[in-house]
Amino acid sequence: MFTCAAPPQPCLVRTFLTVRPAAHPRLVLAALASCGVLVSVMQTIVVPLLPELPSLTNSRPADVSWLLTITLLTGAVFTPLLGRAGDMYGKRRVLIVALASMVLGSLLCAISSLLPVLIAGRAFQGAAVAVVPLGISILRDELPPDRVIPSIAIMSSTLGVGAAFGIPAATLVVQYANWHTMFWICLALGLLDILLVLLIVPESKLRTSGRFDVPGALGLSAFLVCLLLAVSKGSAWGWGSAATLGLFAGAVVIVPLWILFELRTSAPLVDLRVSARPAVLFTNLAALLIGFAFYANSLTTAQLVQEPTSTGYGLGASIVVSGLCLLPGGIAMVLLSPVSARISKARGPRFTLAIAAALMAAGYVVRLFTSENLIAIVAGATVVAAGTAVAYSALPALIMHAVPVTETAAANGLNTLMRTIGQAVCSAIVATVLANVVATHAGRTAPTLGAYLIIFVIAGAAALVAVGLTLLIPARRAVPARHPELAEAGRAT
């Protein structure tokens, strides 16, 4: 622990962590949004590299897949934990801890080609996903009321924007530079983001009292590890294998015990009574399905256009072209985030979320009938990305309508967790369908066009169910007087 040598000269590190810089709304938003985009990019940068990593690390393909799985696990576990810690000990302080974790993980991945070291680095990177809900909560606490809705819309959309830009950026690095370069870039940008947060972002005065719920944190972590590990690895291990069934059984046993404990403790990690409110419950369930629909778009687009022409539908595109197919979607997400905020202000975030989910479903209808034409594939993927941007921008406003101001980081962390679970389930379903609905062409086994169409139907159906869940969200919620712009949006729903 750092100590100060003398009272008149306070410790520099402690001063940086506790001082409240003057809040300049645009600068605060820019600093926090850059953190969100970087963390989201970090999640996807290894995807284009996966086919090459077995040879680069002298490992089996099944082992290399842990570079995605471990990030998913640590992100899911640490997002609600760090969100709660932010509410209790200071959001800015915990945000810096999350960014430092990403920097450390990037360093490990940059300096080594050993798979265990890379997995450890990716684990540290995954923990940084909590940056986005923490940033949303800081914006609610610190910005003028008229800037809150537009700012949280932009901050929330960084989860999708970064993912949409991450794969194209990574393909260019993989094609034209040493693969460690992308981790060095993440490290440098992470250090820059830490500096920006220290200099620009104020520490919130709003805190939650009580002790941190350690048993609740351990129980939630155990449940998430069992559930997500089974979902992520079930396709590779076999859905009927002892390991998969054992993990599912563990999750089933843990969750009721955890719920019982959380309901009885005075300061729970997750306030289940608040989470059970229809406004929170249906928003979180919709977030899960929207996360599913969004991830299906990202996972299938690049692979679809890379399928060889011998399949009868594949375009045989290069890894760079396949990555660039997602770029228009990323641009659409950047442009539509502010639009989403204006729609929410005029008609309410519930209306915005319903329209967004319907737009995602429409995008998958386009993809069903245009999966053999590059321009049409890009158009369909862009429509889905546009719907994702609008949806991700509306979700935090709905959550903040229904929770106390002292629980915003934890509540947004839980909402982000639901999106992560949706992505995990999507990854498992996509892997299962593409591995089993196959045909052999010119001596090469590859997924059939029907496999991709099945995925598009499932993802489109998920988006439609999200529309239905959104309509179940109550139309009116009470909002703290400190944020009249949220009350105005709530009345509009």
Image (cartoon, helix red, strand yellow):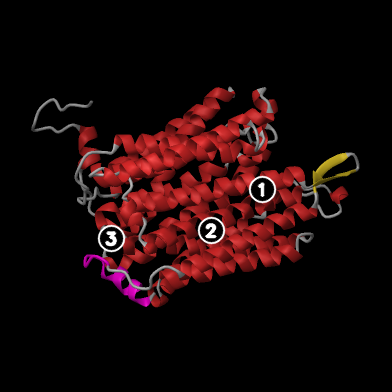
- Residue 481 in the magenta stretch? The answer is yes
CA gap, disc 1 to disc 2?
A: 15 Å
Image mark for residue 290: 2
Q: Are marks 1 and 2 in contact (CB under 8 Å)?
A: no
Question: Residue 331 location in percent, x, y?
Answer: 56, 60
Image mark for residue 430: 1
Residue type at tag 1 = Val
Q: Quadrant of residue 217?
A: top left
Q: Give the left or right position of residue 138, taking residue 340 as reference.
A: left
Q: Are marks 1 and 3 in contact (CB under 8 Å)?
A: no
Q: Counting other residues with Cα less than 10 Å from the Cα at mark 2, is it few (<14), some (14-19), or many (20 or more)? A: many
Image mark for residue 143: 3
Residue type at tag 2 = Ile
Query: 195 and 478: which one is in front?
Result: 478
Q: Are marks 3 and 2 in contact (CB under 8 Å)?
A: no
Query: 369 and 93: which one is in front?
Result: 369
Residue 192 visible in the snapshot: no
Residue 491 visible in the snapshot: yes
Residue drawn at x 43%, y 31% is 104
Q: Secondary structure at mark 2?
A: helix
Image vertical order of residue 3 relative to residue 334, above or below: above
Question: Residue 340 location in percent, x, y?
Answer: 46, 68
**First in sequence: mark 3 or mark 2?**
3
Q: What are the residue bounds of the magenta stretch?
A: 479-492
**First in sequence: mark 1 or mark 3?**
3
Q: Counting other residues with Cα less than 10 Å from the Cα at mark 1, is it few (<14), some (14-19), or many (20 or more)? A: many
Residue drawn at x 62%, y 62% is 461
Query: 408 and 227: which one is in front?
Result: 227
CA gap, disc 1 to disc 3?
A: 40 Å
- Residue 253 in the magenta stretch? The answer is no
Residue drawn at x 44%, y 73% is 343
Q: Secondary structure at mark 3?
A: loop
